[in-house]
Image: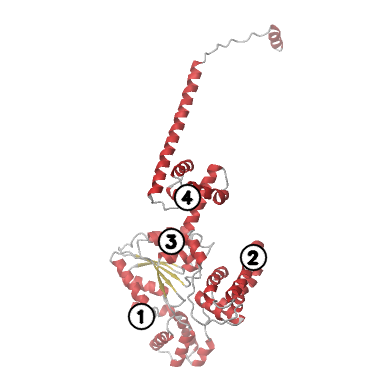
Amino acid sequence: MTQLWPDSFFPKDLSTFIGNSNIVESARKWGEQWEQGKPQKPLLFFGPTGTGKTCLAILLAKYFGWLLFEMNASDSRTKDVIERVAGAASQGSSFSGKKRLILLDEVDGLQGNADRGGVAAINRVIKQSKNPVILTANELYGNQKMTSFRSLCQLMQFKKINYLSIAKRLRELLESENLEFEPEAVKLLAQNSAGDFRSALLDAQTLAISGKIDLLSVRGLGYRERQQDVFKTLGAIFKSGTVEEIRKARFKSDIDSQMLFNWVEENIARHFTEGNDNAAAFERLSRADVFNGRIMRRQHYGFLRYSSELMTSGVSLSREHDYHGWVQYQFPSLLRKLGSSKGMRNLRKQLGLKIGKKTHSSSHTVMSQDLPFLQTAFLKKDKAIALSAALDLNEEEIAFLAGTKPDTKRVKAIFEKAQELRQETISEKRKAMQGLEEQDLKEIEAKPVEETKPAKQDSKDLHKQTSLF
């Protein structure tokens, strides 16, 4: 009893792992591919707490004999730490020659200041790792920082464990410890755990310490409140009929206010399809956006209570019709577009800075006013070559202005001609400078040297000087 039951009854191998059996088998096959020398994409385990995400990663390392390297939410996960520690561990094998399993736990918990640069560093580890990598997260779609991980990893969603499986396992453990219990009480305890096996173990241990596990004591614990994913939150917002239900759904979700706003905005049109419900919902959402703007301008976060109510209760209760069917909610397209265009936006900013330095203009002026004219000029090859040479553009920058890809023949031809033109210009300047230097040297040599004779001093001045002494 001195040790917590989740630690005491930790599964010994993959066969004793309960729930999500399809994921267990897929993860095992993934590990076998690594063992055969076939590198695989990193795995991203996501789902509710207590469903065995971290547990399965540990069991996989034990099954294949890999050295486990774990970095969790309690560790400092800045750019330098991740690159120095996790990055180094991902490159080589252990002393025994076995692979290392890099486990990055709770990556959705990365914080802006505490884990500065952590997302970019983890992405580099994922792309460059020569060892198997597993990431875990509770929420995949409600966190903008998870966008890059979704495209780089093989996603495996953990479902809540069936309460009957939890009850069966609890009975086995209680019998092994010779503890008294009522079967119906254990069943109720499993139901109240809401699919979280770890919390079910903790509740069972609490009751076992105090005495017999019976229905009365289990009812005294009550039902555990769980954080729910964004899809259930949206369903509650769009379908609930009272402010109390909507608030409860919002408070149970760990998604931040701005992200929830984006989700609601994206899915209003998918859910409200009858009458004027669509327009009315967007009208309420626009009012919420007005308050968000006031928060940013005035830094007065007291307005958040108004924007939060308008974008949830306001949107939901603006409808005139009831909707009960299933709707496939979509990830906010705005965030998806921003994520996919990040490289292009960075290139645009880089061009603005480079051209602005050449033309003595601000980068903002270049991006807003000059780039459209340059893109038009790049339609003609001779002008594109001249401008590329004058502005010293690389292939990516030429491709951006030409509206094509860097590996096309047109871009390569423009870049090569521009480099030749730059070399010719530099050579001409050097020749001109050398000519000026030679001409100056000849003029200096041709100029006669005049002998300077000492000036005659006046006798009166000489007398004045000697009289002082």
Q: Mark 3 or mark 2: which is in front?
A: 2
Provide the residue designation for mark 2. 295
Question: Which circle's residue, 3 or 2, is located before the other in the chain?
Answer: 3
Q: Is residue 262 left or right of residue 184?
A: right
Compared to residue 21, the image places residue 80 above or below, namely above
Label 3 packing within 10 angstroms: few (<14), some (14-19), many (20+): some
Question: Which circle's residue, 4 or 1, is located before the other in the chain?
Answer: 1
* Badge 3 amino acid: Asn
The image's mark for residue 123 is: 3
Provide the residue designation for mark 4. 401
Q: Mark 4 or mark 3: which is in front?
A: 4
Quarter of the figure with residue 261: bottom right
Task: State the CA–CA distance, disc 1 to disc 3.
Answer: 33 Å
Helix, strand or loop at disc 4?
A: helix
Compared to residue 445, the image places residue 241 above or below, namely below
Provide the residue designation for mark 1. 16
